[in-house]
Image (cartoon, helix red, strand yellow):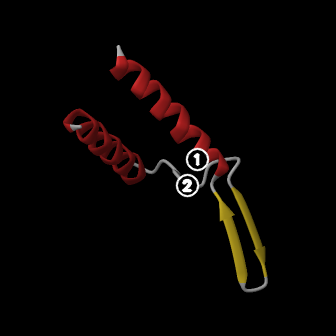
Amino acid sequence: MGRLLIVVGLVIAGAGLLIVFGVPLGRLPGDVVIRRGNATFYFPLGTSILVSVILTLLFAILRR
């Protein structure tokens, strides 16, 4: 459990550093934004796929 918490903390810190240095996390190609009138629908599909791939690789490395 302790190792998992450390990894989650490092991932959050890494995402924070990416945002600070200007990587448009959350505004990647593939993210769906629909604006109609006063309503806005946002679905971060590209960001979700990227996070999924990164976490899959990270957990595969930690499992070994």
| Relative depth, front residue between 4 and 16 | 4
Residue beneath the point at 25% across and 42% down:
5
Vertical comparison of 40 with 42: above or below:
below
Q: Which residue is the extreme one toward the right?
A: 36
Position in image of residue 14 (x %, y %): 34, 42
Q: Is residue 31 shown left or right of residue 3? A: right
Quadrant in the rendering for residue 2: top left
Vertical comparison of 14 with 42: above or below:
above
Vertical comparison of 4 with 16: above or below:
above
Residue 13's tag is none
Residue beneath the point at 70% across and 70% down:
41
Amino acid, disc 1 = Thr
Residue beneath the point at 76% across and 74% down:
35
Position in image of residue 50 (x %, y %): 56, 38
Q: Report the quarter where the N terminus lies.
A: top left
Q: Can you identify the residue that label 1 sits on?
A: 47
Q: Residues within 10 Å of mark 1 (few under 14, many from 20)?
A: some
Q: Earlier in the sequence, mark 1 or mark 2?
A: 2
Q: Is residue 53 shown left or right of residue 46? A: left
Q: Can you identify the residue that label 2 sits on?
A: 26
Amino acid, disc 2 = Gly
